[in-house]
Image: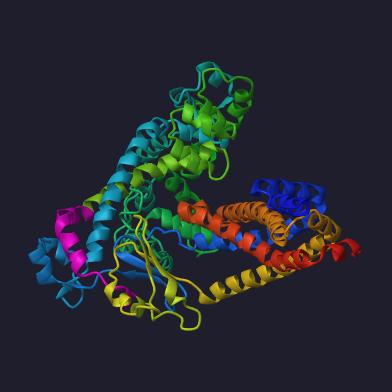
Amino acid sequence: MSTTSANKTTVGRQAQLPLGRAFKISMNSLRIRFWRSMVTAGGIFLGIAFLATVLTQWLMQWPVAPKVDAGFIRLDGQINGPGDYDVYKPVPVEAGVQAGIPEEVIKRVQLKDGNNFSLTEIIQGQLQEKRAVRNLARVKKEWQSLSKYEKDLPLYVDILGGKDIKIGDAVKAGVPKAIVAKAVVHGETIEWARLFKELQRTGKPDSITLATALNKDITPAQAISAGIPKDLVDAVMAVPREIEDEEESEDSGPPPPKPGAFRGTLLAKVLDENPDFWTEFRYVNNLRKVLPVYADMAAEKDIRVEEAVKAGLPRKVAEKMASQYPTFKGADLIDIFREQTDGIKPIYLATALDQDITIKDAVRADIPIAIAKKLAGSGKAFKGSSLNDLIKDHPRWIKIWTARVSRNAIFDTAPQAAIDKLAKSYSISLKEALDEGKGPDAKSANLGNLMIVNADGRKVKVNLNREPALAAATPLVSGDYVFIPDINSFYRMWWLVGMSLLVCMVGITNSMLMAVTERFKEIGTMKCLGALDSFVVLLLVLESSLLGICASGLGWLLGFVSMVLLAGFTKGWDVVATMNPWLVLGSLGVCVVAGMVLTLVATILPAMQAARMPAAMALRSEI
């Protein structure tokens, strides 16, 4: 073999460089042409980032199952009648009895036709009974902590309001005697009970004022016989009475008057609102003066000396009784509290001084944290007066929840096995639900991607375009959320993806074409040294593949993370939790493959053009 042919053979073998060597050359080329490479990678990065956002949005297409009441299903999305619907058909009474539902329960939930009953109402009754039991236990537990403030806290609220305070009451409420002694004592008020006894002894109250002080009913006949004009009686009887729900109203104070009667407090109110009412009647004028005093006695309020004199008590007697009944102004005690706080509980002191009570301070004072947070609302502190109002309201809620437990206890007698059996037999199908919801919107409903989710983890996807019979064959269960997506948004989304990737591919092709053109002399030199056409193509494909993989990975990361954060902060993190981890990895693979395909398609034609160029022509090329 000649030397010339041996040299050709050697050069040919050198041209067949291993893949590792080609990879090293490609990396050096990318490093040398760093900014040109970054321009190409930027196009891939942006295109794949947009693709990743769309894929991530598609991964979060499953709606978050909302809290749907037991016995109901919810239709939402592109449907003509969205809303909650009963998941169970009317159940025949005979079927309920045979299943084991007690007749007393069936009678409570029987429908108007008399032949069927509502299974949903039984389920709701059981849930309401359980909820009432939980709430009753909660409010009773809270009351164990709050009840110790029930007796004393109102006095500190009165101090804040500047009212007259009895010395004995202040000491009983925990105010040290040394602090009480510093308050300005005066004798301006008389204890209502002592005043009433004194007035009774002197025979001052007549039948109307006496009934007012004792909160007794006054009939129209009694009022007219006492000297009240009939027109005034008719005006009082014409005042509308407020009817309250016995269960929701607080059981405090005297009972309301019987029908056809009224109270003296109402008469006093009418006279106060109409100061020129029948001024020609002397008895009415006298009532206008004294009746408010007796109304205050009925409310167990202490009476000032001037008011006692109006009621008929001699001034000297009134002043003497007031001096025997020492009180002080709440405002005077507030000034002392600001200087001396020893021996007073922080909650009481903050109430009297109208200071904020923080949640931490409330918990430290054995107030339940749930109560403290409720009073604070969106803030971190609350006022003692609001705590006092809540304490007053707590016994009422104990009575309310006790009544609800008693009312719904009958539903616990229905066996769960019987309810489950009837629920399975009488639940509606998807078709019946869509019919009840007046059908999906024909213009925008995506019936090929109908989704059913439930808070218990149930997920069902139904394609009614491919298999319409599935609507009748898919039963619904209690708490199902049926979501019908918008098909127009689906088409728009993928159209934007396709157009963005097309624009990216044109940009990448232009960038790769420029990168290959400026390397013509380098390619001609490699071909002079024996590089084959396939080696040139492999070299350029390797460079573009490296760019595609790196840029696609980073683009996917940007698109995925940005979409997750956006969805989490706007729609809630429950939406993010609906994604399948394996599908997330699949979206990464799709993005990387799409990026490589884009770069390869954009690179292959310029690479083949450069590889086919004769070495001499490549060396003579100018840019």
Judged left or right of residue 615, residue 387 is left
- Any part of residue 308 in sight: no
Residue 245, percent from left and from top: 33, 58
Judged left or right of residue 123, residue 534 is right
Give the magenta range. Answer: 408-433
Question: Is residue 117 shown above or below 252?
Answer: below
Q: Residue furthest front?
A: 1
Question: Is residue 573 shown above or below 142?
Answer: below
Magenta stretch, overall SS: helix
In this view, the residue in front, 548 or 199, is 548
In which quadrant of the rendered image does the C terminus lie?
bottom right
Q: Residue at x 50, y 51 (%)?
A: 289
In this view, the residue in front, 263 or 481, is 481
Residue 221, percent from left and from top: 31, 63
Q: Residue furthest bottom?
A: 442
Q: Residue at x 37, y 36 (%)?
A: 142
Residue 598, percent from left and from top: 66, 64
Judged left or right of residue 446, residue 17 is right
In this view, the residue in front, 589 or 583, is 589
Q: Is residue 432 magenta?
A: yes
Total tally of numbered discs in the picture:
0
In this view, the residue in front, 143 or 4, is 4
Q: Residue furthest top?
A: 178
